[in-house]
Amino acid sequence: MAARYTVEEMMEMDPMLLRMHLRERVHHTLEHQLYLVIYGERSAGSRLGNTARQILDVWEKRGLPRDLPDIKWVYQLMDLCERVKNGEKVEEVEGAFSPKRFSAEELETVTKLIKTRRSCRQFTDEPVPEELIEKILEAAMWAPSGCNLEIIRFIVMDTDEELERFHNLEFGLEKAKIVVCIDRRPYDDVEFPPPAKNALLDVGAAMQNMALTAHSLGLASCWSTFSDQQLADIHEYYDLPDYIEVVTYLSLGYAAEKVLPPLRMDFRDALLNK
C-alpha cells in the first residue's frame, strides 16, 4: 500500500488524481530526504524511494505518459535516489540551482512590476490575444503549490455569452475572465496538511502570479469574487464535478481608465514584534 491507497485502488484511479498522489508522495517521502543525503549528513536508507517506486510502477503498468513535465521530474529524482543508494557521492545535481541575487537592473524591473500593478475595472473593446492568456495561465502554474499537489484548475471565459452571464455590475465588461478553481480530491479524508488553508494559499499565489504577469504584458486586470448564486450557476453552466470548487477570478482587458495608485503603509507600521 502506497500511503492511503492500495495498488488495486490506484489501478482504477482517475489518472489526474493518481498523478497528484504521485507528486505528493514523491515530495514528502523522497525529495526532502534525498537533498538531506546529497547536501547534508543523512545516509540513504534502504527504503528511500520505495513508496514513490510503488506508485510509479502503477503509473507504468497503466501505460500512462512518461514524458509529462512533472513525471520527468519524478524520474530524475528516482535516478538520483538509485545513485545515492548505490553509494555514489553526487557532487552536482544536473538542472538544479540555488537563488542568486538579481542585478540592479533586474531588481529595478521586479520592483517596478510589483509597485505599479493596480486593479482596473474599465476596459476597451480590444480583445485579449489568446497567446497572452496562455502566458498568464503558465505563470499561475509556476506559483508555489502546497505539497506539490498542483490543485489549481481554470475556466477561461472569453465569449460574449460567458462574460455577460457572469458579469460583475461594478465593472465595465472585461474581454476575458480567468476563473480559478481547486481540485479538492487530494485532500479527501486528510487532516494534515490543513486542506482549507493550503488550498486558499495556492489560489492566492496563483492569482498574484497572474495579476503581475498580466501587468507586465500591458493588460489591465482586477481580482474579484463571485456571489454564491454565481458560483452555483458556474457549476451548472460548465457541468463541473462536485470535487471542483470555484474560488475567484481575474478580469482581463486593455485599460480604459487611468487609476490613481493608493499608496501603501510603510512596512514598519505593519510589524507586530518591533
Image (spheres, rainbow, N blue to C red):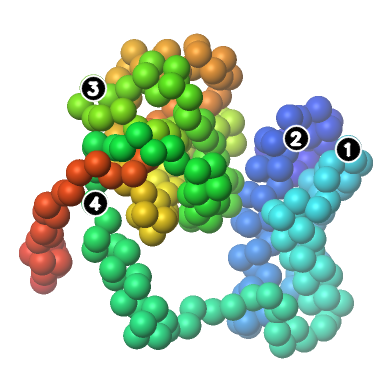
Give the CA distance from mark 2 to mark 4: 39 Å
Q: Is 37 placed above or below 156 here?
A: below
The amino acid type, in three-letter code, at marker 2 is Pro
Quick one: label 1 or label 2, which is nearer the N terminus?
2
> Who's the residue at 62% across and 56% down the image?
28
How crowded pointer 2 is (Cα within 10 Å; few <14, some 14-19, many 20+) is rated as some
The label on residue 15 is 2
Identify the image quadrant of residue 14: top right
How crowded pointer 4 is (Cα within 10 Å; few <14, some 14-19, many 20+) is rated as some
Residue 261 appearing in the image: yes
Q: Is 76 placed above or below 61 here?
A: below
Give the CA distance from mark 4 to mark 1: 47 Å
Secondary structure type for disc 2: helix
Q: Give the residue pinned by disc 1.
A: 62
Q: Is residue 145 left or right of residue 40?
A: left
Q: Where is residue 164 in the image (x, y as percent from the top left)?
A: 37, 19
Q: Position of residue 181 (x, y in %)?
A: 48, 33
Identify the image quadrant of residue 126: top left
Quick one: label 2 or label 4, which is nearer the N terminus?
2
The label on residue 169 is 3
Q: Give the residue pinned by disc 4.
A: 118
Give the CA distance from mark 3 to mark 2: 39 Å
